[in-house]
Each structure stands twice: as structure tokens, then as C-alpha cells.
Amino acid sequence: MNKVNIVLVGFMASGKTTIGRRLSEITQQTFFDTDDYLVNKFEISIPEFFDVFGEELFREAETSILKDLLKYAPIISTGGGIILKSVNRKLLKESGHVVVFLDATFEAIQIRLISDKNNTRPLASVSQMAQLKERYEMRQSYYQEVADLVIDTTGKTPTEVVSEIEFFLKKSNA
Ligand SMILES: Nc1ncnc2c1ncn2[C@@H]1O[C@H](COP(=O)(O)OP(=O)(O)OP(=O)(O)O)[C@@H](O)[C@H]1O
Ligand SMILES: O=C(O)C1=C[C@@H](O)[C@@H](O)[C@H](O)C1
Ligand SMILES: [Mg+2]
């Protein structure tokens, strides 16, 4: 697989971090995850950040991290809410990176969240599925808006998802 700049967007548990790591291995390019970057930068976990500073400050920190990473990072996976701010959508669309939207049905997302033993996502408590579904539906058009490529990951393994990305990039000579 050729060297190429890629940003992965999508809802919580759509597989952005998983696929980002694999793309990094295959292309031998460095990989950054906006969530991990924030945790390292502020030395605080995401649930703690939400508790102490609130979602609004989290979103501001996210924008500043996205801006930085787009300047030098070839493979980036983003937090599920990165598309909420219009400034971030603009940054993504104008980045020159291939933006890949990892889509999945809400049912598939639910199953992944329930089986994710490390689910500490503050906005994805499995006890509040109705609210989560609203968030999912509200965000779909934002992910679509920024995407160069949309992949439905429902029922596919991470290996199959990576192959689809490779196929698209080959076809478009990216
Ligand atoms: N294609 C897939 N099929 C089934 N499970 C998957 C797939 N991709 C990822 N998973 C699983 O779903 C869970 C969430 O994956 P991951 O952390 O990569 O999602 P994410 O999109 O980065 O989520 P977040 O937005 O919260 O950072 C993990 O347990 C992972 O193993
Ligand atoms: O979808 C969201 O709003 C979030 C997703 C995670 O990646 C983290 O960025 C955080 O838990 C918020
Ligand atoms: Mg992630």
C-alpha cells in the first residue's frame, strides 16, 4: 500500500482507532489518535476531562489537536464527536487527507460497545441507549459531509475494512 494521508471519522466504536493502527502498520507511517493525544497532552483520562472541564472545553481542545495533527500526521483517527464543530468539518474537508467515514448500523455499534470491556466513553453509557441513538442519528449527515469515502463496516472484520480502503485508494491512484 502506497504512502497516503488518511483521517478516519465515525461514531463511537465504529473502529477508527482499530483501523488507524492497522493502516499505520501496513503503510509504515506514523499514527495518531486525537483521543490518545489529548489524554497524553493533559495527562488526564477522557471521562475525567469531561467531569472536570465539561464537554465544551473538550471540544475546544479537540479542535486545537486536530489543527496540529493535520499539519504533520499521515494517519489520524479522530474522536467520534470531531464533526460536531463546523470549524472541524472545514479543517477536515480542506486538509488534503483522504477522509474515510467508518459507518455501521446503530445495532452493530451497540453490540461493539457492550462487548468492549474498556468502554469508558463518557457519552456512551450502555444504560442510555435511547440518548445514544439520537446522537448517532444527528451525526450521520456530518460524517457524510466530510467524507471522501464511506465504508459500511457492519458485519465486516477489521481486515475486510482495511482491504476496502486499500481498494479505493488503488482505484483512485491516491
Ligand atoms: N469491524 C469491526 N467489527 C467488529 N468489532 C470491531 C470492528 N472494529 C472495531 N471493533 C471493536 O469495536 C470496539 C471499538 O473499536 P475502536 O476503539 O477502534 O472504535 P473507535 O471508533 O475508535 O471508538 P471511539 O470513537 O470511542 O474512539 C473495539 O472493541 C474493537 O475491537
Ligand atoms: O463521540 C463522542 O462524542 C466521543 C467519542 C470518543 O472518541 C471521545 O472523543 C469522547 O468520548 C467523545
Ligand atoms: Mg477511538
Image (cartoon, grey):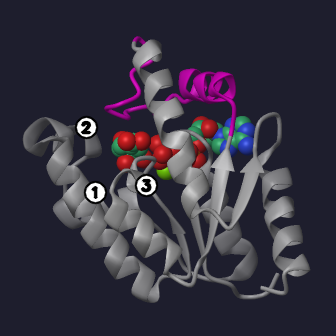
- Residue linked to disc 3: 83
Q: State how many labels appear.
A: 3
Magenta-drawn stretch contains 114? yes
Position of 22 with respect to 45 (left or right) is right
Which amino acid lies under the numbered mark 1 shown in the image of this protein? Answer: Val
> In the rendered image, which residue does mark 2 sit on?
47
Query: SS of the residue at dot 2?
Result: helix
Q: Which residues are magenta?
A: 104-127
Which residue is label 1 attached to?
A: 39
Image spot of residue 6 (x, y percent): 62, 74
Quick one: SS at disc 1? helix
Query: Please, what is the three-letter code of the amino acid marked with disc 3?
Result: Ile
Q: Nearer the viewer, mark 3 or mark 2?
A: 3
Q: Is residue 76 above or below residue 156?
A: below
Asked if disc 1 is less than 8 Å from ligand 2, the answer is no
Ligand 2 within 8 Å of the CB at mark 2: yes
Give neighbour class at mark 3: few <14, some 14-19, many 20+ (Cα, 10 Å): many
Q: Residue at x 79, y 65 (%)?
A: 165
Q: Is residue 87 above or below residue 19?
A: below
The quadrant of the rendered image in which ligand 1 is seen is top right
At a point 17% along the width and 47% down the height, the residue shown is 56
Q: Please state the horizontal and vertical placement of residue 170, each as a whole percent of the image.
A: 88, 79
